[in-house]
Image (cartoon, rainbow, N blue to C red):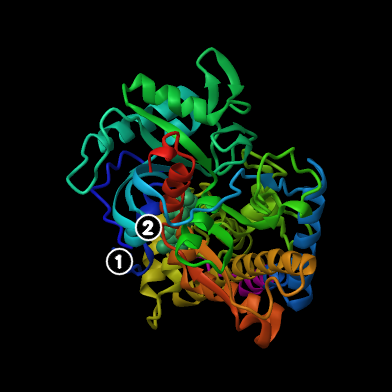
Amino acid sequence: MSLATAASVAVGSLCSPRSRIKGSAFQPRMAVRYDSVKSTNLSSVTQILTNFQNQCATPLPVLRHVADSMSNDMRAGLAFDGGSDLKMIFSYVDFLPTGNEKGMFYALDLGGTNFRVMRVQLGGMDQRVIATDAVQVSIPRELMFGTCEGLFDFIAFGLAKFAEKETGAYQHPQGRKKELGFTFSFPVNQTSIDSGILMNWTKGFAVSGTVCDPQISVGRNVVACLNEAMQRQGLDMQVSALVNDAVGTLAGAKYWDNDVMVAVILGTGTNACYVERMDAIPKLPIQNTQSETTIINTEWGAFSTGLPLTEFDEKMDAESMNPGEQIFEKTISGMYLGEIVRRVLLEMAVAGSLFGGSIPDKLQTPFSLGTPHICAMQQDTSNNLDAVGSILFNEAGVKSNTGARKIVLEVCDTVAKRGGRLAGAGIVGILQKMEEDVKGLIFGKRTVVAMDGGLYENYPQYRSYLHDSVTELLGPSLSEKIVIEHSKDSSGIGAALLAAANSKFRHDF
Ligand code: ADP
Ligand code: MG
């Protein structure tokens, strides 16, 4: 499956400019010499580091407690609405794509940093995915705090520009409205496959309802918001399926591999979904379906039981746009890891003069250090850690010696390790819950967990901590058949497939 990404219409970005730095592609701009006057109080810095490492530690008993709590909270959330932190949202995706889907469909993914538009030509069982074409657009920061109309008009405009350029590989029947699978990666109370009410914004978004309505646009049907914006653009397209990003990933990955049972997103935010049996969902709405299974969107970013948290996490949460909410997300996802590191470094600079007494504004600015930066620092294997020094200088405004850089790397590693290992424990919690319900459903046979998202994709240390934690929890024999694999951009194909499966014109093909 190849994805040709057309030129990006970059007009801004959630975390700009740091979100454009990708893994090893990052090149230090200059080497920095350390020449500050005040000497570091090493014992004070070491003490902050040791305390932080101890509080972040995830030995096996902690991981096991988190995995067990995830299973328990899933059950409680399935029992009744409000039963736990986990919303366990019914996706209305009972029938996964069969492979027979045919025709041209669009997919739109509104994540956190970007939105992506994709066009997919499906050729049925023999030809499967004939062609795909995609474009990615950064979301200007001001639109995250603007109006609902402003955000959706911007998206519909990008969509209309992309839709104008259909080429020979794509055949759309004359006179038939174009159809779209809409991946919306925020908590939505799904009311049918093509409608859903926004429950709350996450990942730093706070979009208001209308110009004259100061209320946050929670409670709006996000499909109506998009359909109306497409109409305003004169775009002859409609939403056929509303899909969460994890659900789209599961549908897309399962199209190629039937052993996929769970999908996990680790990007700006985080989420997970899995295949659940209808009779294991006590709160199930009355269903007119023949299917024995459905996909449950856990919204696991809201999980909070038994997590090893520190004073730095607590302060970051208290100062966030959604205090007390999305605690798992704030501990393991890409939006927050760099910010936790920055907070620890600031404390080390203030209390222990880690950077020679200098405490520049940049180091004091929330989110100045992004997760891509801490990832890039961890890839530096040079003796003097020159790349670490440059990133610290460029992003946090501090000069550092090799000793200070080594401490910074310890902090980065502590945060990545805790995040990756807790994400792994969450995955085991889901697998465990499924296995407890039906013995032999998961363990002892090949089971695939489809992973996607910029954090998982680009941060090798985080990824291996996650894998290690799953192996540690399950043991060598059970973990051998659990395949955790990157399923890049499955969510786009998945959303297009679900639009096809739910097409208003499906009887035509
Ligand atoms: P979204 O979650 O917004 O849909 P992505 O899945 O592309 O988008 O994830 C983007 C996020 O992934 C960024 O906000 C950042 O936190 C993380 N990320 C991107 N590149 C890297 C990198 N090189 N190293 C670590 N994290 C990264
Ligand atoms: Mg996404």
Residue that mark 2 sits on? 394
In magenta, the rendered stretch is 37-49
Residue 410: quarter of image = bottom right
Q: Viewer-nearest of labels 1 and 2?
A: 1
Measure the C-alpha gap from mark 1 to mark 2: 12 Å
Residue 196: where, in percent of width, then height? 59, 33
Q: Residues within 10 Å of mark 1 (few under 14, many from 20)?
A: few
Work out whether residue 14 can be spotted: no
| Dot 2 crowding, Cα within 10 Å, few <14, some 14–19, many 20+ | some
Q: Earlier in the sequence, mark 1 or mark 2?
A: 1
> Where is residue 506 drawn, in percent x and y?
43, 39
Image quadrant in which the N terminus is located: bottom left
Identify the image quadrant of the C terminus: top left
The secondary element bearing badge 1 is classed as loop
Q: Judge left or right: residue 470 versus residue 372.
A: right
Give the quadrant of ligand 1.
bottom left
Residue 325: give x, y in percent of width and height.
Answer: 70, 44
- Asked if residue 45 lies in the magenta stretch, the reply is yes
The answer to whether mark 1 and mark 2 are in CB contact below 8 A is: no
Where 296 sits versus 461, above or below?
Answer: above
**In terms of depth relative to the viewer, which is nearer, 469 or 394?**
469
Q: Is residue 365 magenta?
A: no
Q: Nearer the viewer, residue 358 or 429?
A: 429
| Residue sitting at x 27%, y 46% | 8
**Which numbered marker is on residue 27?**
1
